[in-house]
Image (tube, rainbow, N blue to C red):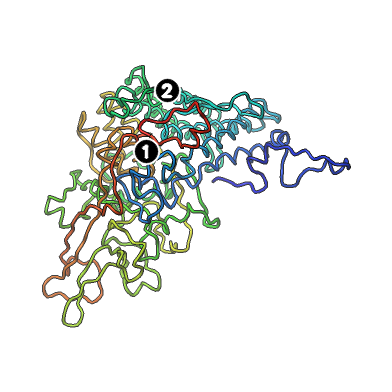
Amino acid sequence: MIQKVKIISLALLVTSISITGCNDNFVNTQPLDQVAGDAVWSDPALTEAFVTGIYAGLGQGGFYEQQLASLTDEAIFTHPGRGITTITEARSNPADAGWINETIDWNQMYLRIRAANLAIQNLTTPKFANTSGIVDRLMGEAKFMRAYYYHQLVRYYGGVPIVDKVYGLGEADYTKARNTMEECINFITKDCDDAAALLKGKSPAKGRANELAALALKSRMLTYAASDLYDAATAKAKSSTHAAFAQPAILGYVSGSRADRWQKAKAAAKAVLDATSGYQLNLSAPATKDAGTTNYMNIALSRNGGDQDVLFSRSFINQKPEAGGQQGLFNGPNGYHNWAGNTPISLLVDDYEMMDGSKFSWSDPAKATTPYANRDPRLYASILYDGAPWKPRTADVAAKDPVNQIQTGQYEVTSGSGKVSVAGLDTRKSTVEDWNGSYTGYYMRKFIDPNPAIVDQNTYQQIPWPFFRYTEAVFNYAEACIELGEDAEARTWLNKIRFRSGMPALTETGDALRQRYRNERRIEMVFEEQRYHDARRWMIAPTTLGRKANTISITGTLKAGKTVSLYKYDPTSYDYSYRVVDIDPGKENRAWLDKMYFLPISRDEMNRNNKLVQNPGY
């Protein structure tokens, strides 16, 4: 958990105040709300408080009202005017790049990097004893956090200026050119190595950096480094925008062997796999459907053993009202008085396989008639769909839905001697709230606590945000194996994940295995800020992130002779029809431009530092 120190801020910690006057006692008085820099670095408790402050750059993790998922083919954001709903415009203008939250923002990341540099500088020659290894631990945490913030900059912006010292007053030059991608990745992985060594054997408080987190960050960064987008020659071949860029080394490797980079990525991932064990990855056959759903929920909720899979997270407590504890309110159904913020699109739902491992297809009448039956068990832990069971309705709605099912369709009911059509309680024509409803016909279930005692409208939950999972390292290892032609080893590890989820083994080889792997990663890591980066580094964004978002239109028609006065999902009384529809372009007008492989550096930042080179296409 990220602690907050009320009387010490990053600015105050390093500031000494000089006061002049005629009274010596007055001159020597220390301000009660400030701490002199020398005092901070001479006191282990104050030093730890400073290092704790560096974690503030993690913000709410991924649990903001607007989520990165809504810039992908996972979800759309429901509410207008936030700079996120029109995906092309929101990523195209250096003067206003649209939605950029604090965990992505260039200036915020460098603010935290400066704090990490300050801690590293003072801990290099500590002024207090390394009792119980406190100096090593704090140095390890500072190096991990510096690596993390640089990795954020690199994966959004490409190569950035590496600043590894604290600038003071009177410097000859405060501007700095962008380093190459290779230099940035080398710097990040070196910090990860240092952090892992310093934190080895340490057991810091939950939410603080640890050895496994450092190893996991290294694994992620080296997996990216070996990918298409980070290889200049491949990026040029796949994108005319990149081909025209005069300084390709800023965005990718211009020399060296990709096979060598994949070998390094494989070794880094294996280091994570060897250092610990994951959750329910020792099954020799697929779990049952119910067990597969439960296993997945345990990981997403980080409980009942599923927390073994989470290597580094941001925790929340319901006694402290933070936005990260309001996922149910932000994303839940409007029929429960929630806001339906980030809603899954049909493109995502349709990519969940059938339980037998075959693809779902609307062109198959048997599948299209009952589209939510016999699907990958993870679907039921991730998506709220029409007819899905959910929490009890609030008291003012309970009489309208005593069986507690999601209603996102239009249904016939009997009225007198005739029939009328009524809108589902969780639609934008709901009798509960005719606003805040999903445009897509789906709602997010993952990361929302199903405990009926947690009324999402006004109760904070305690689900942590997972920055790094053991399962991600498994995927990284399998991906490296596939790219190195080691298909059998890749299948061994991928099938561990599939068995845990209740899915049958993969048997493919070559590119077919690569495509199954990519879909498996998409489904397992959904809503975890992976898809945005994966689709870009694989350079498949034009055919994935750039696709038009779509919705599901559902109609329930009463069967002959059936009478229903209060609707509930009931295939014995209703014939259901399902139709996939592209969303109104006035709501979501998605198109991919290759310049969006990296974000633009803001115009203000470019004006402040004339050594910076803008990313291609802007």
Relative vertical location of residue 439 with respect to residue 127 in this rendering, above or below: below
Image-quadrant location for residue 54: top right
Instruction: Look at mark 2 in the image and give the residue it sits on.
Output: 182
Residue 498 seen anywhere in this rendered image of the structure: no
In the foreground, 506 or 219: 219
Q: Residue at x 36, y 17 (%)?
A: 255
Relative vertical location of residue 162 with respect to residue 13 in this rendering, above or below: above
Q: Residue at x 55, y 27 (%)?
A: 175
Mark count: 2
Q: Is residue 299 left or right of residue 389?
A: right
* Residue 92 place in picture, x, y as percent: 37, 40
Q: Amino acid at mark 1?
A: Thr
| Residue occupying the far bottom of the picture | 416
Q: Earlier in the sequence, mark 2 or mark 1?
A: 2
Which numbered disc covers residue 471?
1
* Residue 224 place in picture, x, y as percent: 37, 30
